[in-house]
Amino acid sequence: MDLFSFLLCWLPVIFLIILAVVFSRPAFDLSIYGSFLTLALVVTSFKTPLKVALLAGLDGILTTLPLLLVIFGGILLSNLLMATGSLSRIVECFMGGVKDSVHRVLLISMGVGNFMEGASVIAEPVVAPMLRVAGISPVGAAALSIIGYSGIMTLEMTGIIITILSLVTGIPVQKLAIASAWLSIPATMAMAVCMQFFLPHDERGFRHLPILLGAGFFTGIVTLGATASLGFSVAGMVGGLALIFVLILVMHKGIALTKEIFRDMTPFLFLLLSLVMVNSIPMLKELTFHKLTIKVSVIPIHIITYRPFFSAYLYLFCAFCLALVLLKVPKSQIGEILRLGIKRGWSVFVAMSLFGAMGQMIAYSGYKTAFVHLDKLHNIPWILAHGLQVYTGNLYPLFVPFLGWIGTFLTGYGVASLMLFGQLQVQAAGLLGTSATWLASGLAVGASIGSISSPFKIAIATPMCGAVGKEGEILRLTIPLGVVSAFIIGFILWLGL
């Protein structure tokens, strides 16, 4: 391996940085340009046969399929609940139990935000306007709608992110979930500290630091406990709910759970109960995780396993159908909700698919025809791992969460970091003689933190709270906050390894 090859490996990342930062291209464009550049690079410079590269890309698309289904289900459910006013009623119910402004911000941003993202419901369209109504500035509302859930994002989306990481790396999913949950505790505390920069000016300062840190620590600990006992698929939801109820208890306020509110919450309760059952009842877990599976292999060295009765997407669609019945939605409105879901989701599906393809083309670069032989000197993950080992030595774990941050910053999707750099952690662990589980988990937590610096995520939030045109003002704060937080997790990871 020479220095030129090592630097050439970074070309897709540098290219995407230029497109994102200099030319302000959206994630959809990044995925198209990035995938074509990656294909050309692995075929010409890294001597990978075109057929091998294309098959690796197809493998990446199929690997991300569970995530695409979760995103689509989440979009449909969130559109339905917002269109019927169901989410607004739930929020008003819980908001009535908290009067203090900082507690209210914590309840909305960290409590509701984590619960929504944990249930695969996109949080920003709900949380950002809530924060604005609570008296937060447009810039603060947009930023806080993302910061609140970024610490434990790895364990949200009903567990699909950890599932994708396991598929990419081959590491058992529960091992990754537990390690990520541990690292998510300091990550959530770091995000809690970041929140003070977006509070109203008269609420900023060190006097609120104990409650912010305490809320972050509590949410992280509960999420870890839920991961170990109930299953990683529901950990984010449990963490968010626990914080909501604790804040209400601390403020000694009651909440009025009417029949209407209970009806509004039934889809979430169904989703929570279903995922808890398949994760905690041994017979159901054995059946849904090991037996009722579909195996697909487009390349001989990687088998993709789908678990439709264990993963969240089936239960999301069931929750959507249940909500249609309970809320008595007319047929005309159902059609509009479906059209809106497709309109909002198609570009996300294409972008995620292409990022998945790009990641697997990188991961399987250097393989010869039929994947029977790997030329390590032309394998991008091996070159990066070996180069980072040479140039950073034992400090490599310090940079792993930052790699995750880069991927999310560039693409808007934490899973893109896992697709791009997940296999790299397995390679690096072998070279450094350390734990691939902890390196991969550090990457995932860094990718979660990257959400606060993602132009894509911020673009979702700003129209919801009157902050359109102020994205640059937000990024000037969230980029350095995200980088510092990523290196804090990297330092903890380095100390532990």
Image: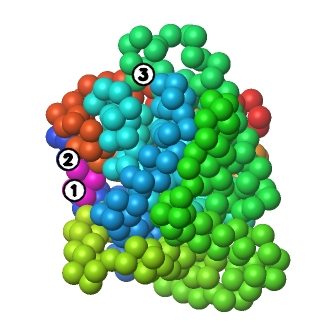
Percent position of residue 54, x then y: 36, 76
- Comparing labels 3 and 2, the label whose residue is closer to the camera: 3
- SS category of the residue bearing label 3: loop
Percent position of residue 70, x then y: 46, 69
Front-lying residue, 64 or 156 = 156
- Residue at 73% in and 54% down: 226
Q: Which residue is mark 3?
A: 199
Disc with the residue nearer the chain's start (1 vs 3): 1
Residues at discs 2 and 1 in contact (Cβ within 8 Å): yes
Residues at discs 1 and 3 in contact (Cβ within 8 Å): no
Query: Mark 2 to mark 1: distance in Å?
Result: 6 Å
Q: Quadrant of residue 137?
A: top left
Q: Residues within 10 Å of mark 1 (few under 14, many from 20)?
A: some
Q: Which residue is mark 1?
A: 29
Question: Which quarter of the rendered picture does the C terminus lie within?
Answer: top right
- Left or right of 339 on screen, residue 157: right
The segment highlighted magenta reads 26-30
| Residue 177 is a magenta residue | no
- Residue at 61% in and 82% down: 309
Disc with the residue nearer the chain's start (3 vs 2): 2
Q: Quadrant of residue 392?
A: top right
| Dominant secondary structure, magenta | helix
Q: Which mark is residue 7?
A: none
Q: Which mark is residue 25?
A: 2
Q: Is residue 250 above or below residue 163?
A: above
- Comparing labels 1 and 3, the label whose residue is closer to the camera: 3
Name which residue type carries label 2.
Answer: Arg
